[in-house]
Image: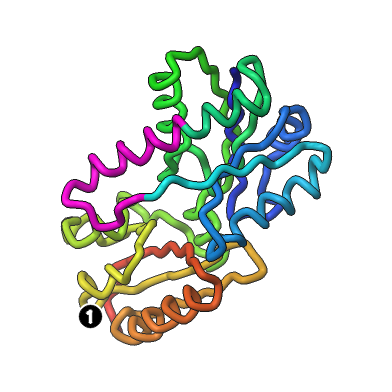
Amino acid sequence: MHCELIGMGAGSPGHITLDGVACLQQVDGIIALDKGDTKHDLLAVRETILQTHAPHVPLVTVADPPRDRHPENYEQEVIRWHHARAELLYRTIVQRFGVESRVGFLVWGDPALYDSTLRIIDHMRTVADAEITVTVYPGITAIAALTAAHAIVLNRIGEAIHVTTGRMLPATSKEDRRNCVVMLDGGTAFTEVAGPDTYIYWGAYLGTPQQVLRQGYVADVGEEITALKAQLREEHGWIMDTYLLREIPAS
Protein backbone atom coordinates (compact mmCIF):
# COMPACT_ATOMS: atom_id res chain seq x y z
CA MET A 1 0.00 0.00 0.00
CA HIS A 2 1.22 3.50 -0.79
CA CYS A 3 -0.11 6.57 1.02
CA GLU A 4 0.20 10.04 -0.50
CA LEU A 5 -0.09 12.91 1.99
CA ILE A 6 -0.98 16.13 0.20
CA GLY A 7 -0.88 19.38 2.13
CA MET A 8 -3.89 21.49 1.19
CA GLY A 9 -3.14 24.65 3.14
CA ALA A 10 -6.25 26.32 4.50
CA GLY A 11 -8.43 24.42 2.06
CA SER A 12 -8.28 26.61 -1.03
CA PRO A 13 -7.79 24.72 -4.32
CA GLY A 14 -5.03 27.23 -5.04
CA HIS A 15 -3.05 26.24 -1.95
CA ILE A 16 -1.99 22.86 -3.34
CA THR A 17 1.37 22.68 -5.12
CA LEU A 18 1.56 21.58 -8.73
CA ASP A 19 3.29 18.38 -7.58
CA GLY A 20 0.42 17.78 -5.16
CA VAL A 21 -2.15 18.28 -7.92
CA ALA A 22 -0.33 15.85 -10.21
CA CYS A 23 -0.31 13.25 -7.42
CA LEU A 24 -3.97 13.89 -6.64
CA GLN A 25 -4.91 13.04 -10.21
CA GLN A 26 -3.20 9.64 -10.03
CA VAL A 27 -4.39 8.15 -6.72
CA ASP A 28 -7.06 5.46 -6.51
CA GLY A 29 -9.03 7.49 -4.01
CA ILE A 30 -8.92 10.07 -1.24
CA ILE A 31 -9.62 8.93 2.32
CA ALA A 32 -11.09 11.34 4.86
CA LEU A 33 -12.37 11.11 8.41
CA ASP A 34 -15.95 12.31 8.80
CA LYS A 35 -16.21 14.38 11.98
CA GLY A 36 -19.99 14.71 11.91
CA ASP A 37 -22.59 17.22 10.76
CA THR A 38 -21.18 20.13 12.76
CA LYS A 39 -17.93 19.88 10.78
CA HIS A 40 -19.40 19.04 7.37
CA ASP A 41 -17.57 22.06 5.93
CA LEU A 42 -14.29 20.17 6.42
CA LEU A 43 -15.46 17.46 4.02
CA ALA A 44 -16.99 20.00 1.66
CA VAL A 45 -13.57 21.63 1.26
CA ARG A 46 -12.07 18.31 0.17
CA GLU A 47 -14.95 17.78 -2.26
CA THR A 48 -14.30 21.20 -3.78
CA ILE A 49 -10.59 20.46 -4.18
CA LEU A 50 -11.35 17.17 -5.92
CA GLN A 51 -13.93 18.78 -8.18
CA THR A 52 -11.35 21.39 -9.14
CA HIS A 53 -8.30 19.21 -9.70
CA ALA A 54 -9.34 15.55 -9.96
CA PRO A 55 -13.12 15.07 -10.41
CA HIS A 56 -12.62 11.41 -11.37
CA VAL A 57 -11.08 10.51 -7.98
CA PRO A 58 -13.55 9.19 -5.37
CA LEU A 59 -13.71 10.61 -1.85
CA VAL A 60 -14.24 7.85 0.72
CA THR A 61 -15.26 8.94 4.21
CA VAL A 62 -14.84 7.08 7.49
CA ALA A 63 -16.67 8.03 10.68
CA ASP A 64 -14.10 9.39 13.12
CA PRO A 65 -13.85 7.25 16.30
CA PRO A 66 -14.97 9.00 19.51
CA ARG A 67 -12.38 10.75 21.66
CA ASP A 68 -12.34 11.86 25.29
CA ARG A 69 -11.73 15.60 25.15
CA HIS A 70 -11.00 15.88 28.87
CA PRO A 71 -8.98 12.76 29.76
CA GLU A 72 -6.93 12.24 32.89
CA ASN A 73 -3.95 11.35 30.68
CA TYR A 74 -4.03 13.45 27.52
CA GLU A 75 -1.10 11.74 25.78
CA GLN A 76 -2.41 8.22 26.39
CA GLU A 77 -5.86 9.15 25.16
CA VAL A 78 -4.44 10.62 21.93
CA ILE A 79 -2.40 7.44 21.34
CA ARG A 80 -5.49 5.26 21.91
CA TRP A 81 -7.51 7.46 19.55
CA HIS A 82 -4.82 7.32 16.85
CA HIS A 83 -4.72 3.51 17.09
CA ALA A 84 -8.52 3.37 16.66
CA ARG A 85 -8.28 5.66 13.65
CA ALA A 86 -5.47 3.57 12.16
CA GLU A 87 -7.41 0.30 12.41
CA LEU A 88 -10.50 1.83 10.86
CA LEU A 89 -8.63 3.56 8.03
CA TYR A 90 -6.57 0.50 7.11
CA ARG A 91 -9.64 -1.75 7.04
CA THR A 92 -11.53 0.74 4.87
CA ILE A 93 -8.66 1.16 2.40
CA VAL A 94 -8.20 -2.59 1.97
CA GLN A 95 -11.92 -3.25 1.57
CA ARG A 96 -12.42 -0.42 -0.93
CA PHE A 97 -9.16 -0.38 -2.91
CA GLY A 98 -7.08 -3.43 -1.96
CA VAL A 99 -3.70 -3.92 -0.30
CA GLU A 100 -1.76 -2.76 -3.38
CA SER A 101 -3.65 0.50 -3.67
CA ARG A 102 -2.35 4.05 -3.89
CA VAL A 103 -4.50 6.28 -1.71
CA GLY A 104 -4.33 9.96 -0.84
CA PHE A 105 -4.96 12.03 2.26
CA LEU A 106 -5.71 15.73 1.89
CA VAL A 107 -4.12 17.23 4.99
CA TRP A 108 -4.92 20.64 6.45
CA GLY A 109 -1.93 22.96 6.37
CA ASP A 110 1.28 20.97 6.08
CA PRO A 111 1.53 17.27 7.01
CA ALA A 112 4.71 17.96 9.01
CA LEU A 113 3.33 20.60 11.39
CA TYR A 114 0.81 19.82 14.12
CA ASP A 115 -0.92 17.12 12.11
CA SER A 116 -1.38 13.50 13.13
CA THR A 117 -1.69 11.76 9.73
CA LEU A 118 1.93 10.58 9.61
CA ARG A 119 1.64 9.18 13.14
CA ILE A 120 -1.60 7.42 12.24
CA ILE A 121 0.09 5.76 9.26
CA ASP A 122 2.84 4.56 11.61
CA HIS A 123 0.07 3.02 13.74
CA MET A 124 -1.42 1.43 10.59
CA ARG A 125 1.88 -0.35 9.98
CA THR A 126 1.76 -1.69 13.54
CA VAL A 127 -1.88 -2.74 13.82
CA ALA A 128 -1.93 -4.34 10.36
CA ASP A 129 1.66 -5.58 10.32
CA ALA A 130 1.72 -4.20 6.79
CA GLU A 131 4.26 -2.60 4.50
CA ILE A 132 3.11 0.94 3.84
CA THR A 133 5.18 3.48 1.93
CA VAL A 134 4.57 7.20 2.21
CA THR A 135 5.18 10.27 0.07
CA VAL A 136 4.56 13.73 1.48
CA TYR A 137 3.70 16.81 -0.57
CA PRO A 138 4.17 19.89 1.64
CA GLY A 139 1.46 22.47 1.98
CA ILE A 140 1.01 26.06 3.11
CA THR A 141 1.09 26.16 6.91
CA ALA A 142 -1.36 28.12 9.03
CA ILE A 143 1.67 30.16 10.11
CA ALA A 144 2.43 31.20 6.53
CA ALA A 145 -1.24 31.96 5.90
CA LEU A 146 -1.35 34.11 9.05
CA THR A 147 1.72 36.19 8.26
CA ALA A 148 0.61 36.61 4.64
CA ALA A 149 -2.85 37.73 5.69
CA HIS A 150 -1.41 40.36 8.04
CA ALA A 151 1.47 41.19 5.63
CA ILE A 152 4.08 40.83 8.38
CA VAL A 153 7.47 39.16 8.74
CA LEU A 154 7.42 36.24 11.16
CA ASN A 155 10.93 36.69 12.51
CA ARG A 156 12.41 39.77 14.12
CA ILE A 157 16.10 40.57 13.72
CA GLY A 158 18.19 38.60 16.18
CA GLU A 159 15.20 36.86 17.80
CA ALA A 160 14.05 33.27 17.80
CA ILE A 161 10.56 32.10 16.85
CA HIS A 162 8.68 29.86 19.26
CA VAL A 163 5.79 27.69 18.05
CA THR A 164 3.45 26.04 20.53
CA THR A 165 -0.17 25.11 21.24
CA GLY A 166 -2.83 26.80 23.29
CA ARG A 167 -2.58 23.98 25.81
CA MET A 168 1.16 24.61 26.30
CA LEU A 169 1.17 28.42 26.14
CA PRO A 170 0.65 29.08 29.89
CA ALA A 171 3.75 26.96 30.65
CA THR A 172 5.85 28.75 28.01
CA SER A 173 8.59 30.99 29.37
CA LYS A 174 8.29 34.74 29.14
CA GLU A 175 11.37 34.83 26.90
CA ASP A 176 9.84 32.34 24.44
CA ARG A 177 6.61 34.33 24.40
CA ARG A 178 8.39 37.41 23.05
CA ASN A 179 7.71 36.18 19.51
CA CYS A 180 5.40 33.18 19.75
CA VAL A 181 3.05 31.47 17.31
CA VAL A 182 0.13 29.64 18.91
CA MET A 183 -1.86 26.92 17.17
CA LEU A 184 -4.68 24.57 18.20
CA ASP A 185 -6.02 26.88 20.89
CA GLY A 186 -9.49 25.61 21.72
CA GLY A 187 -9.91 28.49 24.17
CA THR A 188 -8.21 31.86 24.54
CA ALA A 189 -4.89 31.07 26.16
CA PHE A 190 -3.50 34.47 25.14
CA THR A 191 -5.64 36.09 27.84
CA GLU A 192 -3.80 34.06 30.50
CA VAL A 193 -0.30 35.24 29.59
CA ALA A 194 -0.70 38.69 28.08
CA GLY A 195 0.97 41.69 29.65
CA PRO A 196 0.58 45.39 28.80
CA ASP A 197 3.05 45.10 25.88
CA THR A 198 1.63 41.88 24.35
CA TYR A 199 0.47 42.44 20.77
CA ILE A 200 -1.57 39.82 18.91
CA TYR A 201 -1.96 39.07 15.21
CA TRP A 202 -4.97 36.75 15.06
CA GLY A 203 -6.71 34.98 12.20
CA ALA A 204 -9.44 32.39 11.74
CA TYR A 205 -10.33 30.35 8.61
CA LEU A 206 -7.12 31.69 7.11
CA GLY A 207 -6.91 31.77 3.33
CA THR A 208 -10.61 31.03 2.83
CA PRO A 209 -13.55 33.29 1.91
CA GLN A 210 -14.55 33.13 5.60
CA GLN A 211 -11.22 34.55 6.77
CA VAL A 212 -11.42 36.86 9.80
CA LEU A 213 -8.49 38.93 11.07
CA ARG A 214 -7.83 41.03 14.15
CA GLN A 215 -4.71 42.67 15.53
CA GLY A 216 -3.80 44.93 18.40
CA TYR A 217 -2.66 44.87 21.99
CA VAL A 218 -4.37 42.05 23.86
CA ALA A 219 -5.46 44.58 26.47
CA ASP A 220 -7.45 46.34 23.73
CA VAL A 221 -8.70 43.51 21.49
CA GLY A 222 -8.57 40.42 23.72
CA GLU A 223 -12.21 40.56 24.80
CA GLU A 224 -13.35 41.17 21.22
CA ILE A 225 -11.43 38.15 19.93
CA THR A 226 -12.79 35.99 22.76
CA ALA A 227 -16.37 36.93 21.86
CA LEU A 228 -15.67 36.59 18.15
CA LYS A 229 -14.30 33.05 18.56
CA ALA A 230 -17.48 31.98 20.35
CA GLN A 231 -19.64 33.63 17.69
CA LEU A 232 -17.77 32.05 14.77
CA ARG A 233 -17.81 28.60 16.37
CA GLU A 234 -21.57 28.92 16.79
CA GLU A 235 -22.04 30.03 13.17
CA HIS A 236 -19.81 27.41 11.52
CA GLY A 237 -19.87 24.55 14.05
CA TRP A 238 -16.04 24.64 14.15
CA ILE A 239 -13.19 27.10 14.14
CA MET A 240 -9.53 26.97 13.13
CA ASP A 241 -7.54 29.95 14.32
CA THR A 242 -3.87 30.79 14.71
CA TYR A 243 -2.14 33.77 16.23
CA LEU A 244 1.22 35.40 16.79
CA LEU A 245 1.99 36.97 20.17
CA ARG A 246 4.70 39.59 20.09
CA GLU A 247 6.05 41.83 22.83
CA ILE A 248 5.99 45.40 21.52
CA PRO A 249 6.50 48.21 24.05
CA ALA A 250 3.35 50.30 24.06
CA SER A 251 4.01 53.93 23.26
Quarter of the rendering containing residue 81: top left
Lateral position of residue 104 relative to residue 116, left or right: right
Vertical side of 56 occupied by 158: above or below? below
Residue 63 coordinates in the image, percent (x, y): 53, 47
Q: In this view, does 148 lie to the left or right of 56?
A: left
**Residue 151 visible (yes or no):** no
Instruction: Report if residue 77 lies within the magenta region.
Output: yes
Rendering coords of residue 60 (x, y %)? 66, 40
Q: What residue type is labelled 1?
A: Pro
The image shows residue 77 at horizontal and vertical percentages of 27, 43
- The structure residue drawn at horizontal position 68% and vertical position 55%, both measured from the top left corner, is 12
Give the vertical position of 65 relative to 155 (above or below): above
Q: Is the magenta stretch mostly helix, strand or loop?
A: helix
Residue farthest along the right direction in this orientation: 56
User: How many marks do you count on the picture?
Assistant: 1
Is residue 2 or residue 195 the one in the foreground? 2
Q: Which residue is drawn at 51% across and 61% down?
A: 146
> Along the horizontal axis of the image, is 77 left or right of 41?
left
> Where is residue 24, by image quadrant?
top right
205, 3: nearer the viewer:
3
Magenta range is: 67-87
What residue is drawn where x is 43% and y is 76%? 229
Q: Which residue is drawn at 77% across and 37% down?
A: 57
Q: Judge whether residue 126 is colored magenta.
A: no
**Quadrant assignment for the C terminus:** bottom left
Can you identify the residue that label 1 sits on? Answer: 196
- Residue 134 image offset from top left, x and y in percent: 55, 22
Quick check: 135 above or below 223? Answer: above
